[in-house]
Amino acid sequence: MSTDESYARELDAQDPLARFRDRFVITEPDLIYLDGNSLGRLPKATKALMADLLDEWGDSLIRFWDKNFNIQSDVGDKVAKLIGARPGEVLIGESTSVNMYKLFVAALQLQAGRTRIVTDDLNFPSDIYILNEINRTLGNKHTVEVVKSPDSIVGPVEGIKALLDEETALLTLSGTVFKSAYNYDMADINAAAKEAGAMVVWDLSHSIGSVPVDLNGSGADMAIGCSYKYVNGGPGAPAFLYVRKDLQEKLRNPIAGWHGRKDQFDFGLDYHPKDGINRFLSGTPDVLSIMPIAVGIDLLLEAGMDRVREKSVAQTEFMIALWEAHLKPYGFTLNSPREAKWRGSHVAIGHADGWRINQCMIQDVNILPDFRAPDNIRLGITPLYTTFTELHTAVMRIKQIMDEKLYERYSTEMTVGEGT
């Protein structure tokens, strides 16, 4: 594959999704933004929407709230279209961690008598924190098994399957791993868990909007995920949860709140959950925070996830070719799967001086990536607005950092903040 700038420009000229870049707010043309896998750009339509919503709130008062009282299921049905779910299987609301808590506890209650919980060491740490605290709260009745990846890049599939038996209550994994972008074969994992009678909760935070997901087709039980990365829902936008329709009535929401109660406006002190997915509602809906998510979903649906994935694969392949030609000689390693089918929409490169190089990228050459310890520089590629030419320019700027040893002016001591 060519790694020339002229080839990058040719790919941009042929890109059927190129028109979507203009649908986002881009105020710094020289900034190369490679952190859309942490926070997506602001859609222009969201700016207009928020102004209208604030006016409507001011004019309509409580009537504005009444009009949008079912927004969690309404926008949830939109999310369902992105992740291969049916209407009535997805809700928007709360944070990823809160939704995770709900589904983990619900699954463990249903699986009473089984004592093993399985995850891997590639999972997002918060997922494991929550598992351990739930186990402590329940009296340490379970053993949390964290299966180690053989190389910190690919999932330990065989090790996971070896722990799936009659003792296993719950398996939870990230569909796309946050450090390496490794993609699990969800259908394969779901089938193995089902055979053992174990339930599975998927974390789709790095999958939704970046890779096609088919929860129904893959036989998934439950899933959660955020909406502020590839969905472009905004900083801290509410998360989603999915529960397969035939499981919904078997599960109890451990955070019982008035919004999930049947006949909620009679304000009785006894609790009877709503039917279907709405039993997982808890508190009052975050109307103003949920509305922008619909804009991001509509953009992805308009583009088509198959075309988004096709461009993502082309761009990550191009980035890997650029790494091999221009960065590998400086000691950079590829910390993402080489084969496209196992890779999401970011490319992780490692270097012994990764932290200092990352800071130099931000401060000196106007690239905004992020860093994940111990050595991962994550280069997030968002097909709706990232160009091939930007990828080429980014690598040439990193090469400049290495040629001129610009990173040596930065401390090796990690600090919390931009780019971490």
Image: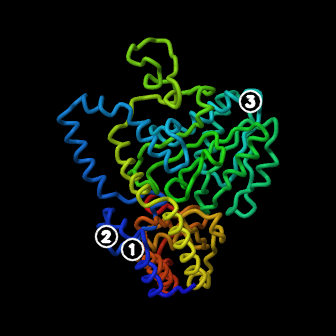
Quarter-of-image position of residue 24? bottom left
Q: Are marks 1 and 2 in contact (CB under 8 Å)?
A: yes
Q: Nearer the viewer, mark 1 or mark 2?
A: 2
Quarter-of-image position of residue 58? top left
Which residue is located at x 61 percent, y 53 percent?
A: 175
Q: Earlier in the sequence, mark 1 or mark 2?
A: 2
Q: Earlier in the sequence, mark 3 or mark 2?
A: 2
Which residue is located at x 61 percent, y 44 percent?
A: 216
Label ID, residue 366: 1
Q: Quadrant of the N terminus?
A: bottom right
Q: CA distance from mark 1 to mark 3?
A: 50 Å
Q: Is residue 383 left or right of residue 152?
A: left
Q: Residue furthest left?
A: 59
Looking at the picture, tell me which residue is in the foreground, 266 or 322.
266
Looking at the picture, tell me which residue is in the foreground, 316 or 214.
214
At which x and y percent is residue 198? 74, 38
Residue tagged by mark 3? 141
Tag 1, which secondary structure?
loop
Q: Are marks 3 and 2 in contact (CB under 8 Å)?
A: no
Q: Is residue 400 left or right of residue 192?
A: left
Label ID, residue 283: none
Amino acid type of the residue tagged 1 in the rendering:
Asn
Tag 3, which secondary structure?
loop
Residue tagged by mark 2? 28
Q: Is residue 184 left or right of residue 405?
A: right
Q: Earlier in the sequence, mark 1 or mark 3?
A: 3
Amino acid type of the residue tagged 3 in the rendering:
Lys
